[in-house]
C-alpha cells in the first residue's frame, strides 16, 4: 500500500467523522456543513482514483460533482434562511435544535 492508499484510508476516516457530524449535529447548519464536507471528500477520492488509474475524464466527473455539491449546499442554505424569515420562532428551533443558551427550550423560556 503506497502513499495514495494511505491517503484513501485517511479520507475514508474523515468521511466517517463527517457522517457523525451529519447524524449528531447540534443544528441543521452543522448538518449542512457535514454534507458539504462529505461532498469535498468524495471529490478528493474521485481525483485520487483518477490519478491512480490515469483516467482523465474522471477529473471532469469530480469537477461536476463538486459543482453540484456546491449548488445543493446553496439551495439548502437558502431554504433554511427563507424559512427563518417566514417564522422567526420556528427558525430558532430549526437553527438551534430547540435549545437556547441556557439549555431551555426556546418556546418555554421565561414561563415558569
Image (cartoon, rainbow, N blue to C red):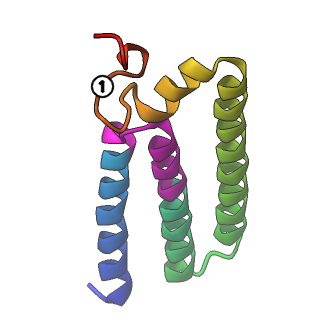
The image quadrant that residue 17 belongs to is bottom left
Picture layout, residue 103 above or below residue 4:
above
Nearest the eye: 24 or 106: 106
Picture layout, residue 1 above or below residue 60:
below
Tell me which residue sits at (26%, 84%) in the image: 1
- Where is residue 64 shown, x and y percent of the image? 72, 58
Tell me which residue sits at (52%, 44%) in the image: 32
Q: Of helix, strand and loop, which one carries label 1?
A: loop
The image quadrant that residue 60 belongs to is bottom right
32 lies left or right of 63: left
Tell me which residue sits at (36%, 42%) in the image: 25
* Residue carrying label 1: 104
The image quadrant that residue 13 belongs to is bottom left
- Where is residue 9 shown, x and y percent of the image? 30, 71
Nearest the eye: 37 or 100: 100
- Provide the residue span drawn in magenta: 22-38
Badge 1: how crowded within 10 Å, few (<14), some, or many (20+)? few
Q: Is residue 30 magenta?
A: yes
**Image quadrant occupied by the C terminus:** top left
Number of numbered discs overlaid on the protein picture:
1
Q: Is residue 36 magenta?
A: yes
5 lies left or right of 47: left
Magenta: main secondary structure: helix
Nearest the eye: 95 or 68: 95
Tell me which residue sits at (71%, 19%) in the image: 86
- Where is residue 23 shown, x and y percent of the image? 34, 38
Q: Residue furthest top?
A: 112
Amino acid at each position: 500500500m503506497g502513499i495514495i492508499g494511505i491517503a484513501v484510508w485517511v479520507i475514508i476516516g474523515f468521511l466517517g467523522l463527517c457522517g457523525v457530524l451529519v447524524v449528531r449535529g447540534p443544528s441543521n447548519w452543522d448538518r449542512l456543513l457535514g454534507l458539504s464536507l462529505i461532498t469535498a471528500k468524495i471529490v478528493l477520492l474521485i481525483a485520487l482514483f483518477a490519478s491512480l488509474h490515469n483516467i482523465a475524464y474522471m477529473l471532469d466527473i469530480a469537477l461536476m460533482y463538486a459543482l453540484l455539491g456546491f449548488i445543493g449546499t446553496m439551495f439548502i442554505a437558502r431554504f433554511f434562511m427563507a424559512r427563518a424569515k417566514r417564522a422567526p420562532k420556528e427558525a430558532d428551533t430549526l437553527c438551534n435544535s430547540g435549545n437556547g443558551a441556557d439549555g431551555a427550550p426556546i418556546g418555554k423560556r421565561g414561563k415558569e
